[in-house]
């Protein structure tokens, strides 16, 4: 396939934000069909004083489209071996951490633990090392797990369209692949070696996954690398482009902020909780139907405070080291999580805010709210 997503350079996006005025923000807030100009207005410095109004609008839209529910999932780390040198990641090939690659039996045992804890939706995650863990492994694991889980997602190395189609046939229905940063210069600066240095190949990956028939595709930016307002706008542009090309596919957006990890990388442009909230509200108002993820990278206080305000999907009880559910002392995590609560504790916090945690039936919930 030869369809290519392109977007303006970040310095052009920076300039644009400074032309936005309060009147543009007001228009965007109450627009019935917000466009990319409205998204830019909502991400701009001029929108900061409207944050409470943005939160209310975002909450209203979220309840209309998704109901008073939060969907729950857990990541299952399969391998910490990676061929890439990403400055910000604990799995980067340079880091001297204890590496582990699960066998099929071990991965299945980890999955069953999550199943016993009540998860029906799991995200299979691995470092990018195709010779160590490739499509054959993901396919065999999916065939073993598909009858036990309502949905299986992957967040692994970018694959070809044919490989995604093969995994879809085996029972994987969703792919997450984050661009990390849409700022081309910073992308080059933080990706030091390995296949991931090819920005264009990564950028085209969501389209390959969607064209292979995946039901859902997740995109995202790692916050703390580049200007978050420009990342938000680039994400919106990418999302709108993907929707136009693949109208049958559901999309999600993630907002992972950089966390402490082996290697000691510090955020280049830190993103505050206030910035993150503005980004979530802006994306929700821009695209009422997109799934928005808030992971255990964030702390309990922030996650609890954000319930119902835009995000629709939370991870819970997460461990970022392979084998970490069977053996909680497993070393070699990708990054330190911020919310260490168990699934039951997260469920209680969600209920305490008047929302229902959903572990099993996302699909029927989607149908109910699409009706
Ligand atoms: S971010 Fe992904 S590709 Fe980069 S080092 Fe970490 S696991 Fe490997």
Image: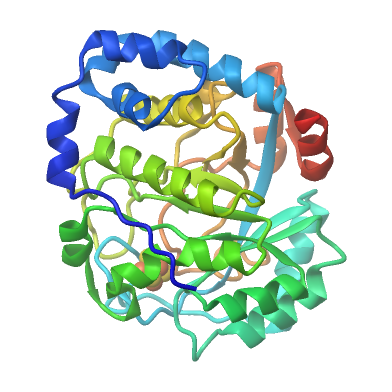
Residue 312 at x, y percent in the picture:
61, 34
Foreground of the two, 67 or 95: 67
Image point (78%, 52%), residue name: 120
How many marks can you see? Answer: 0
Q: Quadrant of residue 194?
A: bottom left
Residue 309 location (% of width, % of height): 54, 21
**Is residue 91 something one can see in this rendering?**
no
Q: Position of residue 335 (x, y in %)?
A: 40, 57
Applied colour scheme: rainbow
Q: Position of residue 93 (x, y in %)?
A: 32, 79
Q: Nearer the viewer, residue 120 or 351?
A: 120
Q: Is residue 16 above or below residue 2?
A: above
Image point (59%, 14%), residue name: 60
User: Which quarter of the rendered image does ligand 1 occupy?
Assistant: bottom left
Identity of the residue drawn at 57% across and 66% down: 209
Single out the residue that lies furthest toward the right: 147
Residue 273 vertical position relative to residue 121 in the rendered view, above or below: above
Residue 80's place in the image compared with 252, above or below, is below
Which of the 4 quarters of the picture holds residue 257? top left
């Amino acid at each position: 396939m030869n369809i290519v997503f392109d977007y303006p350079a970040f310095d052009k996006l920076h300039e644009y934000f400074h032309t936005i005025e309060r009147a543009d923000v007001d228009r965007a807030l109450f627009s019935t069909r917000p466009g990319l100009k409205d998204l830019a207005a909502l991400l701009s410095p001029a929108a900061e004083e409207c944050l409470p109004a943005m939160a209310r609008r975002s909450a209203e839209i979220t309840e209309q489209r998704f109901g008073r529910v939060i969907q729950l999932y857990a990541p299952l780390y399969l391998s910490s071996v990676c061929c890439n040198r990403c400055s910000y990641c604990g799995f980067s090939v340079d880091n001297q951490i204890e590496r582990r690659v699960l066998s099929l039996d071990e991965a299945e045992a980890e999955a069953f633990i999550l199943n016993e804890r009540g998860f029906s939706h799991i995200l299979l995650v691995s470092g990018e090392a195709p010779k160590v863990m490739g499509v054959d492994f993901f396919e065999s694991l999916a065939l073993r797990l598909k009858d036990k889980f309502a949905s299986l997602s992957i967040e692994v190395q970018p694959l070809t369209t044919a490989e995604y189609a093969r995994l879809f046939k085996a029972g994987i229905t969703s792919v997450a692949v984050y661009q990390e940063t849409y700022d081309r210069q910073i992308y080059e600066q933080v990706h030091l070696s390995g296949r991931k240095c090819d920005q264009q190949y990564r950028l085209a990956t969501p389209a390959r996954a969607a064209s292979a028939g995946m039901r859902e595709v997740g995109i995202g930016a790692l916050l703390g690398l580049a200007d978050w307002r420009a990342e938000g706008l680039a994400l919106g542009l990418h999302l709108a482009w993907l929707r136009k090309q693949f109208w049958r596919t559901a999309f999600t957006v993630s907002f992972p902020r950089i966390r402490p990890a082996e290697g000691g990388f510090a955020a280049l442009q830190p993103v505050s909780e206030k910035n993150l909230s503005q980004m979530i509200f802006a994306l929700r108002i821009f695209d009422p139907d997109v799934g928005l993820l808030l992971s255990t990278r964030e702390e309990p206080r922030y996650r609890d405070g954000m319930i119902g305000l835009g995000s629709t999907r939370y991870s819970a009880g997460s461990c970022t080291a392979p084998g970490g559910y069977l053996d909680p002392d497993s070393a070699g995590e990708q990054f330190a999580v911020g919310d260490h609560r168990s699934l039951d504790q997260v469920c209680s916090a969600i209920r305490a805010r008047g929302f229902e945690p959903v572990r099993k039936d996302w699909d029927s919930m989607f149908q109910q709210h699409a009706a």
